[in-house]
Amino acid sequence: MRYLLGLVVFWLGIGPGVGPGSVGLWISGAAAQSTEAEAPEVPQRSDPKTVYLTNGEWPPYSSRHLDHYGFFSRIVTEALTLEGYSVVYGFFPWKRSYELAKKGHWEGTIGWAPTEERQTDFYFSSEIVNVEKVFFHLRDKSFDWNKVEDLADYRLGVTAGYTYGRDFDQLRQDEGLKIDESNNDKANLVKLLRGRIDAFPLELDVGYYMIQSTLKKRDASKITHHPRAVMETPIAVAISRQIAPERADEILAALNRGLQTLRELGIYEKYRTEMMPRS
């Protein structure tokens, strides 16, 4: 199959709660030029060969600051390009991204797990990436576990509002774990380096991206991860149930076909190798 790279246009919404009239950054992937323009919450969807998806900040999977806007964004873009579609992304805070797509203002949103609750609002594509949460710890500190009860021996960092799987969350609720909660993942990374916690769970790729992009090399080299995942989550593209059913079917069919082709040609793994951080 001939592999085509088409024109992809991105709308970048700046700041939380972006509304109509807010200023964003208009970027044309083909022309490599940038000019300011409004980032609309309700884009004009006039071209049937263009798919309109909201997006957000979750590096290295998606970010307006990364090449190709992250691995996940690149896979979605090129899967649809193979099927003759271009993509418009609207970057918003994640909660807003979800709501705008849920209401059908945008046709869908990327980077979501197909939970039972979300399936009442969206149709989901095939899995784009399987995300593993693992425990990060210092190389010179002994850390091992097989079942969640083994974790009771350690001081564990967690991030407020996150889930770490049914068994972990239940044991935590039962006060069977020594927990030190932080407001964000970076704070847990600092606590780990200072010896205030023994380990903390985080998405494998996200963790190494954070380590390599925010720490000095001597500090980054001190951290490793345990190979056992505490949680695994399939992440996909969500297409709104508020758009016409035949349009939703069209987008999902094209995306899934393109994704299968990327995998069969080895392009998916090539991009993963190039774009994902290495441990």
Image (cartoon, rainbow, N blue to C red):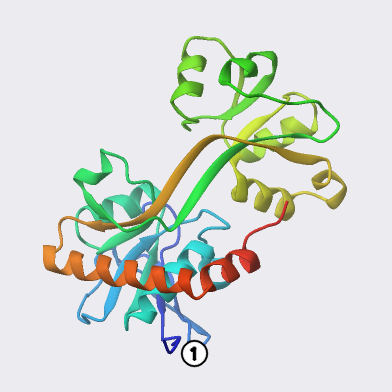
Give the image quarter of residue 243.
bottom left
Q: Residue at position x 42%, y 48% from top? A: 234
Residue type marked 1: Ala
Q: Is residue 121 above or below residue 79?
A: above
* Side of 152 where 173 appears, left or right: left
Q: Residue at position x 16%, y 69% from top? A: 247
Q: Is residue 244 visible?
A: no
Q: Residue at position x 38%, y 81% from top? A: 82
Q: Count the marks.
A: 1
Front one among 113 and 254? 254
Front one among 276 and 196? 276
Give the image quarter of residue 39.
bottom left
Crowding at mark 1 (Cα within 10 Å: few <14, some 14-19, many 20+): few
* Side of 126 where 63 appears, left or right: right
Q: Position of residue 88 (x, y in %)?
A: 35, 73
Q: Position of residue 163 (x, y in %)?
A: 46, 31
Among all residues in the image, which is located at the extreme top?
Answer: 175
Q: Residue at position x 77%, y 49% from top? A: 215
Q: Is residue 205 above or below residue 266?
A: above
Q: Is residue 97 above or below residue 267?
A: above
Q: Position of residue 242 (x, y in %)?
A: 15, 57
Front one among 111 and 92? 111
Tell me the element at label 1.
loop
Mark 1 highlights which residue? 31
Q: Position of residue 52 (x, y in %)?
A: 30, 70
Q: Is residue 193 above or below residue 132?
A: above
From the image, which quarter does the N terminus lie in? bottom left
Q: Is residue 160 visible?
A: yes
